[in-house]
């Protein structure tokens, strides 16, 4: 076997491995982008209710320099407000 074929084969194998790793990373990114529960971006606060049964739940939202409040949220991501204003949110063990 020539040196050229060995090098070409090795480069092809390395490219296949790197492509496979890229596919795994791409699959992991969406769930990392919207984690379950409360999370913030650089500017906004969200609550992501992760469910497969379509349930709606009550969360308590903690607000800076204002009264906290409860809110009913459905499946998926719900915008709560500015990350500067919202301090957190959590499930209060009730459905709505």
Image: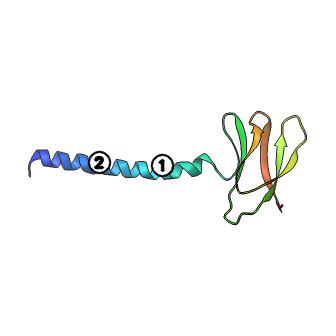
Q: Is residue 34 or residue 55 the one in the foreground?
A: 55
6 to the left or right of 49:
left
The answer to whether residue 62 is left or right of residue 26 is right
At a point 71% along the width and 57% down the height, the residue shown is 75
Outermost residue, left side: 2
- Mark closest to the chain's N terminus, 2 or 1: 2
Residue furthest to the right: 67
Q: Is residue 72 left or right of residue 78?
A: right
Structural distance between the alpha carbons of marks 2 and 1: 18 Å
Residue 66: image location, x then y, percent: 89, 37
Residue shown at 49% from the left, 52% from the top: 27
Query: Which residue in the protein does label 2 denote?
Result: 14
Residue that mark 1 sits on? 26
| Whole-percent x, y for residue 29 in the image | 53, 48
Q: Is residue 86 above or below residue 16?
A: above
Q: Position of residue 5 (x, y in %)?
A: 14, 48
């Amino acid at each position: 076997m020539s040196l050229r074929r060995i090098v070409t084969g090795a480069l092809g194998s390395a490219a296949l491995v790197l492509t496979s790793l890229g596919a795994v990373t791409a699959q992991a990114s969406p769930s990392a982008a919207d984690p379950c529960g409360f999370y913030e971006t650089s500017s906004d606060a969200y609550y992501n209710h992760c469910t497969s049964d379509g349930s709606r739940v009550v969360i308590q939202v903690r607000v800076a320099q204002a009264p906290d409040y409860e809110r009913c949220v459905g499946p998926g991501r719900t915008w709560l407000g500015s990350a500067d204003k919202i301090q957190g949110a959590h499930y209060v063990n009730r459905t709505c």
